Image (cartoon, rainbow, N blue to C red):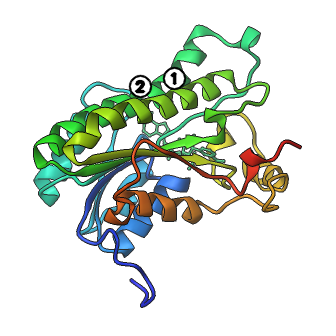
Amino acid sequence: MADKNMVDEIGGKVAIITGAASGIGLATAELFTERGAKVVAVDLNPDVKKLASADLFPVVADVTTDGSAEMAVTAAVERFGRLDTLVNNAGYINYKEVVETSREEWEKVMAINSTGYFLFSREAMKVMLPQKSGAIVNIASYASYFAFKGIAPYAASKGAVAQLTRALALEAAPHGIRVNAIGSGDVVTNILDSFRDDGREFLVEHGKAAPIGRSAEPREIAEVVAFLASDRASFVVGSVFMVDGGFSVQIA
Ligand SMILES: NC(=O)c1ccc[n+]([C@@H]2O[C@H](COP(=O)([O-])OP(=O)(O)OC[C@H]3O[C@@H](n4cnc5c(N)ncnc54)[C@H](O)[C@@H]3O)[C@@H](O)[C@H]2O)c1
């Protein structure tokens, strides 16, 4: 339940959150419903159904499949009456150098992390344009700007998210719709499970190299999602808001 110091920033808003079964998406879905928002929670993982409540409608769907975005938008409008916020968050990473990477592996990363964001943004815009209001928050990464060896498809896909954010923001802003992204640093989640068993421990250790000296908990990203989705961020348009404990501002 809401605590007394909470800012009432997203109460009453209706949001679609993709990748809501785990990590940042789960924390965002929890924070939004705690603060009085209604949520359509989309995930490939059927565990998302366990989140069902009067305020949260789960949709088991692959963000890359034609029709998934339409299904989520329809659910928001039919169940909750409107759509105020889209949080594009579902993500996937693999770890391989380019010469070892197959076309299928490249396309899988691009499909989830870039095409999925495009498909959901397009369908959300179709409801937000006639409403003349809305906010889209894309979960990007410091890998939108910087790279490590072994993550070329991921870095390319997150670079695309940053540019989708800027280009769509220009189309959306005259209609009262704000599009922004979060350049997330290391967050302790299951994101690395696709290629290593100690993914969470790795993220804990890796975050120690940030100026702040640690990785984030998913809730620390969710707080910024809520701000960017809220009317308090009314002048924030087309930005990639770095939330990385300072990782991206240090040279060594
Ligand atoms: N954890 C980090 O350090 C970090 C850093 C920067 C950016 N990010 C980004 O944050 C976002 C959330 O990742 P996370 O760290 O919470 O990871 P996570 O693995 O805990 O959660 C990702 C969720 O996305 C879902 N998903 C994956 N593919 C999907 C698909 N095709 N359709 C529907 N759902 C799908 C998964 O089932 C999972 O529930 C991702 O976009 C990721 O790239 C994470």
Residue sitting at 28 percent across and 42 percent down? Answer: 173
Q: Earlier in the sequence, mark 2 or mark 1?
A: 1
Q: Residue furthest bottom?
A: 4
Q: Quadrant of ligand 1?
A: top right
Residue 88 showing in the rendered view? no
Disc 2 is placed on an element classified as helix
Q: Position of residue 4 (x, y in %)?
A: 42, 91
Nearest the eye: 72 or 227 = 227
Q: Real-space Cα distance between discs 2 and 1?
A: 6 Å
Task: In the displayed orientation, state which residue is furthest to the right.
Answer: 252
What residue is at 74 percent from the left and 21 percent from the top? 96
Cβ of mark 2 under 8 Å from ligand 1: the answer is no
User: Residue 130 at what x, y percent from top left?
Assistant: 10, 43
Residue 235 occupies quadrant? bottom left
- Name the side, left or right, on which 173 lies relative to 183: left
The yes-or-no answer for disc 1 within 8 Å of ligand 1 is no
Q: Where does the image place residue 104, in percent across and percent down from the top left? A: 56, 13
Estimate how packed mark 1 is, as few (under 14), some (14 to 19) or many (20 or more) residues with alpha carbons within 10 Å.
many
Q: Which amino acid type is shown beneath numbered disc 1? A: Met
Classify mark 1: helix, strand or loop: helix
| Nearer-the-camera pick, 177 or 208 | 177
Q: Which residue is depicted at the point 69% across and 50% down?
A: 186
In the picture, the quarter occupied by the N terminus is bottom left
Q: Any mark on residue 115, and which?
A: 2
Quarter of the image holding residue 152?
A: top right
Circle 2: residue type: Thr
Residue located beneath label 1 in the image: 110
The reply, left or right, for residue 199 in relation to residue 60 is: right
User: 109 or 35: which is nearer to us?
Assistant: 35
